[in-house]
Image (tube, rainbow, N blue to C red):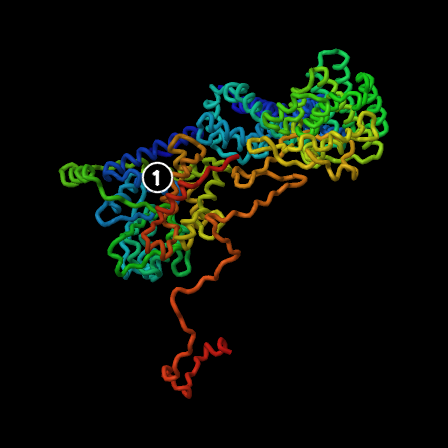
Amino acid sequence: MPNPIEVINLARQRAGKVAALNVTVLGSPVCLLTAFVALELGQRSGQVWRRMGIALSSTAASRIRISLLALAGAGLMVTAWSSWRAYRQARDLKRLAARLDGEINAHQEILTFGEVIAGGTEAASTRSPLFPVLWQRVSEYLSSFDPAACFRINMPRLLARSALLTVTWLVLLFGSLILFSSSQRPPYYNEARRLAELANEIDKTTSSAQTQALARRLRAGARALLNPNTSDKEKLIQLTALRRELEQAEPGGTHAEKPQAKAAARAGGASAGQGSANQRGTGAGKQNQGQGEGGKGGEGRGLGKQRSAGAATEEQGLLEQARNELSKVEKQLETGTARQPKSATKIGDNNPQGQQRQTSGGQANVNPLRPGNQPVPAPENKEGTGSRRQQTARGEATPKAGAGTKNPGAGHGDTRLGETPASRAYARFYKPGEHGPALGIKDARYVTVSIPPAAEPAAGGKIIAGGAPSKAATPYANLPLPTGAVPANPQEQQLVPPRYRDLLR
Amino acid sequence: MGVAPRMTPAERAAEFREVFKRAQAEVGKVIVGNQATIRRVLSALFCGGHVLIEGVPGLGKTLMVKTVSDALGLSFKRIQFTPDLMPSDIVGTQVLVEEDGRREFQFKPGPIFAHIVLGDEINRATPKTQSAVLEAMEERQVTVFGNTYLLKPPFFVLATQNPIELEGTYPLPEAQMDRFIFKVVIAPPKPEELREILSRTTGVALSQVKAIFDPPHAPAQVERLKSLVREVMIAEPLERYVIAIVTSCTPGSAAAIPEATQYLRFGPSPRGAQALILGAKVNALLDGRVTVSYEDVEDVIVPALRHRLLLNFQAEAEGVSAETILDQIVKRLRRPRL
């Protein structure tokens, strides 16, 4: 017959270990994962930025890293403490006895036994004379008891629970990080994103190793632009060097000498109509075809590409765009007027650039002080065909300021100096009498409203403004009743009940 | 069975089970059915408490008590409670005795001086007479003319109460009800039990009860077994469980169940908790254990508490009984977790 106290002690040790292991396996992966995410935050942020267009500033990333590391450390400490606590609780004699009672179905005999022996030798004198019977019965109960079998480590179930917890935590963590990143944009974010976007496009367009290297440097420049630990002066130096590389890569280097490139560049940033005007200046007849096909301004850049003479021209256009972007950023760095992005955007969403989509032909977006950003020659801004309505009923044309006429605000300077607008699908307006879904005019710079002409009277009739007031169909007279019709004696007084007197008064 | 030699604890526990089962079997020779009632009566005897038996006339209440005393070899007295019964008729009185030319008062013990006392239809006596029994039940002593006389142990009162014909009765006060450890209700016999009763009582051969203990040693034997009940161990969580049961049917307490608050005026006293634990200890011994389990406690909740719950007017108007409330308590109770 085994000694029940020894068996119970073995069970205590086993239960304590199992409980501690359970807590450790459950809590540690979460903490370690948090630490891993913290350490990999800098490494992975570049990928996230490239793939999702979401980036963290270095300061924010550093703070998050520290926070996550602290969280992981605290989590590990809590896990360790919880494990220790679980170990202690599982080893508690009374708890274990109650648990054994449940396992063996001992009708609280082991519980009572555990309570009696927990009193120690001091309580031995007050033990019931029936204690030997209890000892014998508990020994019989525990003779076939195997602590290892009772307190098993169910590792698959444990790992499944741990994995579930870890995945949940991971999702929450990344969700929080993305939300935080989306809400916290560093200075020059839009510009850096635009540069990265251009670099990607250059990568896709070109096959030359030299240009690809340029794209890489452009991307690195974009990243450097986002680095808050780098001073504006250093950024300016880097970007200037980068711009010079771009200029060297582009022989000629000015818009005047490369009208096709300029056209492509402007087509990427300006509306389709303006791109058409530019192309018209160079005599590219394809432009009119594209216009007739729909004139979707949002695809201006793509249309520009399609309409360009070839990949080389497109590459040149992209390089010029990149140079213009660099010029713009340089200007901002020089003046220290970095603009915080107003809203969380992603790569591919051209909303910031789209805010300038209705400006006149990209002219206002070109920094005239920078090489290659000279104003477009005047003929381009003048009315080209005379009937240049950019949109018609099926997407043919919409009257657009600056499309066919000279932009009145073009010579008044522009706060978006050097910014090349990216064209996008501008709002299409309905003609009088045309109906369709509601038009979104949010963020529109201005809206052209056409007042419908006066309605022609039908059948030679006469339209009279206003109308005759309505009249009652039944005649009525507002005359007083005859005096004799009032039977009440005017001298008669009716006493007002007391409860109404206050009301009347 | 004579005086037992020095026995081991295991032997004592086994002896208790054997005696109890033999007594139950002996009583069962005379009383048909109602085994649960017999068990409860014997449990109360070994707990050291008193039992209130309720049942309509003719169900064998008196016979049961008489048979228990015969089976255990204990002395038995019966008191028929009537409205004109005086306390001295129960506890005894001083009588003038002339002996050797001298006259002196001698105490003449009443029928309360017995090991097992049957108070038949106890609710028919006046409160004054009932109170005379109270002291005896609780203190195990009576006081007559300033002299206190101890009752010889074991002292066991079984009072019967008729739930009908309540005119001219004096319902037992709450204090007196509380002194009964159990209240058992005798159910009418089932048809097959009734047939057995007829065959036993109307035939030639009558059942004879054989005493388990020799009458001279019976009180000591019973006292020894009673002390064994007190030695049964109970763990602290079970004590908390008992307390939870008592407080859950105490209106006004934080742990009271809604039914208790709605239908009860008063809940059980601490004697209710004592009754629960003692009854559970007997159950444990009968089950071969020396420790109390939750099942042992739950088994005695109704008989130990049903007469300690004082229903309010709403409960009586709606026909809610104490048993209903206790059933709710049993359903809702959660065993304490460590």
Against A193, residue B279 (above or below) is below
Camera sees residue A10: no
Of the 4 image quadrants, the one containing the N terminus of chain B is top left
User: Left or right of B56: which side holds B116?
Assistant: right
User: Left or right of A54: which side holds A134?
Assistant: left
Q: Nearer the viewer, residue B108 or A204?
A: A204
The chain ID associated with circle 1 is: B
Q: Give the residue at the far front of this rendering.
A: A460
Q: Please provide percent x and percent y for residue A418.
A: 78, 31
Q: Nearer the viewer, residue B188 or A500?
A: A500
Disc 1 crowd rating (10 Å Cα; few below 14, some 14-19, many 20+) is: many
Q: Nearer the viewer, residue A173 or A97?
A: A173
Q: Please provide percent x and percent y for residue A321.
A: 75, 24
> Label 1 amino acid?
Ala
Against B335, residue B10 (above or below) is above
User: Left or right of B276: which side holds A8?
Assistant: right
Q: Secondary structure at mark 1?
A: helix
Q: Nearer the viewer, residue A70 or A40?
A: A40
Q: Please provide percent x and percent y for residue B264.
A: 40, 53
Q: Which residue is mark 1?
A: B218
Camera sees residue B23: yes
| Residue name at image x 71 percent, y 18 percent | A314
| Residue name at image x 30 percent, y 47 percent | B53
Give the number of callouts: 1
